[in-house]
Amino acid sequence: MVVWYIIPCMASAPSPDGDLFDEFLTSRGHDVEPARWEESYNKKQCPDCGGLHDDDAVECSVCGWRPEPSP
């Protein structure tokens, strides 16, 4: 005996830039912007550990964090 189940699914066409998904995540407290260096006293500050670095830093020397590449 074979039993088939049909599960209805809702789908929507994805927007080209993901606005609907970003709105969904934002409404639930998530950050949707790429992580970037923060600024503190003319220094770059790591958003993960708070380590301070010179302006030419590309990676956090404390925890190894790197900013996400720009799209």
Image: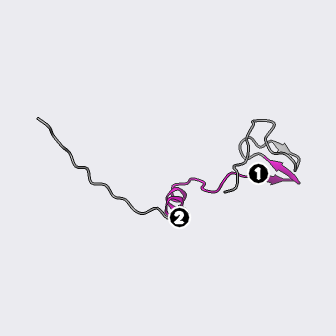
Q: Does residue 41 appear left or right of residue 1 in this picture?
A: right
| Furthest residue in direction left, as rendered | 1
Q: State which region is magenta.
A: 20-45
Total number of numbered discs in the rendering = 2
Amino acid type of the residue that numbered disc 2 sits on in the rendered structure: Pro
Quadrant of the rendering where the C terminus is positioned:
bottom right
Q: Which residue is mark 1?
A: 37
Could you tell me residue 69's position as x and y percent? 70, 51
Q: In the displayed structure, would residue 62 be above or below residue 39?
A: above
Residue found 80% across the figure and 48% down from its top? 45
Of 41 and 13, nearer the camera is 13
Q: Earlier in the sequence, mark 2 or mark 1?
A: 2
Could you tell me residue 27's position as x and y percent? 51, 59
Tell me the SS state at disc 2. Answer: loop
Could you tell me residue 59's position as x and y percent? 79, 42
Q: Residues within 10 Å of mark 1 (few under 14, many from 20)?
A: many
Please report contact status of discs 2 and 1: CB closer than 8 Å, yes or no.
no
Real-space Cα separation, disc 2 to disc 1, in angstroms: 27 Å
User: Is residue 32 located in the magenta-colored stretch of the structure?
Assistant: yes
Amino acid type of the residue that numbered disc 1 sits on in the rendered structure: Trp
